[in-house]
Amino acid sequence: MSAVLDKNGVPQTEGDGPRGLARLAYAFTGWAEKWFPDAFVFVILTLFAVVLGDLAIGASPLAIAKGFGDGFWSLIPFTMQMAMVAIAGYVVAASPPCTRLIDRLAAVPKTGRGAIAFVAFVSMIASLFNWALSLVLGGLLVRALARRANLKMDYRAAGAAAYLGLGATWALGLSSSSAMLQANPASLPKSISEISGVIPLSDTIFLPQSILMCVIIMACTIAVAYFSAPSGSTVKTAQDMGCDVSADAKVEEKAGRPGDWFEFSPVLPILVVLLAAGFIWTEFQAKSPLNVISNLNTYNFVFLMIGLLLHRNIRSFLKAVAKAVPTTAGVLIQFPFYGAIAAILTHVTGSDGVSISHHISELFVSIANGSTFPVVIGIYSAILGFLVPSGGGKWIIEAPYVLQAAKDLHAHMGWAVQVYNAAEALPNLINPFWMLPLLGVLGLRARDIVGFCFTQLIFNAPLVMFLLWGLALTL
């Protein structure tokens, strides 16, 4: 029997209906789907909030307008780099070898709950290398598991597990746009570099405390995914949800004319990859491994070359790229505005000769000390992350005053970046913005998986804050 939904989208039938935390999450998502505007609206609202703040401290309207224009194109290199992260991750995940790997991975779990925990593990591991790869790989793995007739797996919980890379760990690995930005002097805005300088990856994602935090979060998140998964009569399979999970038909294309040979031959991709391999070899010969992988251009270069090699021909590679490009729309249009906001925050001064960024950093210094700073900043970043769902863009807004406050309090600058990273992932768990690519793969709606994501948030939020505070004491 189909459940009757109330005005918030909460199933009203008894028995298998959501209860407790899941019911609250369904109510929240129902409200969000009705009232929550597009993420770009929040970018504009943030812009005008900063403008009003500048006016309040006595800044000139013309000075504000100049800051807006001067900063608008300041992030073009970083914008392109983040777009390429998404494209490269999608291209690799959609390659034929990766598809075959997914089919093999889908044969590993033996139980429905075990399958959900396994999806959570794969999603989080993949997110450490590329957040877009995590979403696509996780979604395709869930579909492959759902095709197993002998596996009774809750499709909603599995979908939520596939999202955990974005909701728990992505910013603690090489996907971290803030850590990568801080390690790249060529991409680092002057407004940030003047405060912190370059912060190497050895002081952020490869800090021992950061690695330990990541392992603990992963272990606890997998456990919650396993024990919160429905069992018995409460399981809703893909068929119960009306989702088509049949494998995509594989149409083998062949060259139809002599000129098509170049598009279908593996010769050109192999030659390109050999040339790329030579470049990577020279990079490792001239630089330390950390310096090589911390360069976003090199990182994206390697992923693209891997994708080209895995697709084996130019036609398949370009089809994957064409499918990946729409996922970058939010990055391309939002990041210029983030650059403008950062410029207004840091370069426009009021009647007292200081910027809003300076005033905010003074506020943090006044309410925090060296030990409470991680929790204060963590809570603030998590709340703001729901309104501005962009790890890299939001860091550019926050970094000037967060890093200034860390500097004034003599806190570890690299850990300040990791505080942001760990807290940044939390609002993703209940924000429909980043769910959209995954939901498209699964054929689900946000309300179908957010109940399980909200359960993760209830456990992860206090855990993350405790780890940010406790591990900071060891630095």
Image: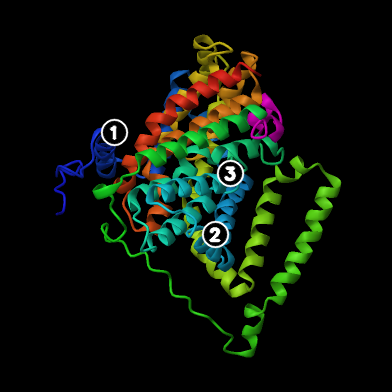
- In magenta, the rendered stretch is 190-207
What is the spatial separation of the Cα atoms under label 1 and label 2, in whole angstroms? 33 Å
Question: Label 2: few (<14), some or many (≥20) within 10 Å?
Answer: many
Q: Residue at label 1?
A: 21
Q: Where is residue 274 in the image (x, y as percent from the top left)?
A: 77, 65
What is the spatial separation of the Cα atoms under label 3 and label 2, in whole angstroms? 14 Å
| Amino acid on which the number 3 mark rests in the picture | Leu
Q: Residue furthest right?
A: 285
Q: State which tag comes first along the sequence, 1 or 3.
A: 1
Confirm whether residue 459 shows in the render: yes
Residue drawn at point x = 57 percent, y = 34 percent: 214
Q: Residue at label 3?
A: 128
Q: Position of residue 23 (x, y in %)?
A: 24, 37
Q: State which tag comes first along the sequence, 3 or 2.
A: 2
Residue drawn at point x = 59 percent, y = 54 percent: 84
Magenta-colored stretch includes residue 205: yes
**Tag 3's secondary structure?**
loop
Q: Position of residue 261 (x, y in %)?
A: 65, 84
Front-lying residue, 409 or 75: 409
| Amino acid on which the number 2 mark rests in the picture | Ala
